[in-house]
Image: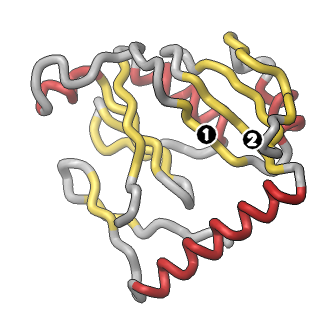
Amino acid sequence: MDLASIRMITDDLERVVQFYEQVTGVAAVRYTPVFAELNMPSCTLAIGHTQTTQLFGTDSARPADNHTIIIEFRVEDVDSEYERLKPLVNDWVQEPTTMPWGNRSILFRDPDGNLVNFFTPVTEDAIKEVRVRRGQHDRARLVFPGPVIHTCCRNGSTYEPAIST
């Protein structure tokens, strides 16, 4: 099994897509006017307009109503990211802080109020854990040799995600 994406629903697709393009540095791929994806090596962040939820059923998802998920990005240097993001982020939850489990983190909210965490492993144990997880991902890839092709969206587009080591 492979986690393909995390999808958020919003009433303001343009604002949210632009925000994530700016904070991640990844250009969104737009398959339709109401859906976009930011494809990263580890996972895809999918962003759909509220109109897309009509396909899933009434009240299947509500925009700007998430209080249980944290969208997390491992970054090379969280302190540098904090300085870079200061002019882009309006709602800071936590300035750079080293957490008890060894990650240095910043927490902020996106334009819809979703909680976002940028973190860098900084202790020896946290750095070691990242290496172990990367190794597990590489071994899982060996079990299923060949390209992993994901089909996404209504138009049947495919892509092969990159594997970072």
Q: Residue placed farthest to the front in the image? A: 100
| Secondary element at tag 2 | strand
Q: Is residue 28 above or below residue 83?
A: below
What's the residue at 35%, 66% (across, down)?
1
Kindly indicate whether the residue at mark 2 contacts the one at mark 1 (C-beta within 8 angstroms): yes
**Protein image colouring:** secondary structure
Instruction: For label 1, count other residues whose C-alpha is less than 10 Å away and answer few (under 14), some (14-19) or many (20+).
Output: some
Q: Relative to residue 32, is residue 26 drawn left or right?
A: right
Examine the image and state in which quarter residue 86 appears. top right
Q: Which residue type does callout 2 highlight?
A: Phe
Which of the numbered marks, if any, corresponds to residue 119? 2
**Is 54 or 104 nearer to us in this picture?**
104
Instruction: For label 2, count other residues whose C-alpha is less than 10 Å away and answer few (under 14), some (14-19) or many (20+).
Output: many
Q: Which residue is mark 1?
A: 72
Give the Cα distance between marks 1 and 2.
Answer: 7 Å
Examine the image and state in which quarter residue 131 appears. bottom right
Where residue 47 appears, x then y in whole percent? 39, 34
The disc, 1 or 2, on the residue closer to the chain's N-terminal end is 1
What's the residue at 49%, 24% (across, down)?
16
Q: Which residue type does callout 1 highlight?
A: Glu
| Secondary element at tag 1 | strand
Examine the image and state in which quarter residue 32 appears. top left
Where residue 165 appears, x then y in whole percent? 68, 72
Where residue 155 appears, x then y in whole percent? 20, 53
Which of the numbered marks, if any, corresponds to residue 35? none
Q: Relative to residue 19, is residue 36 drawn left or right?
A: left
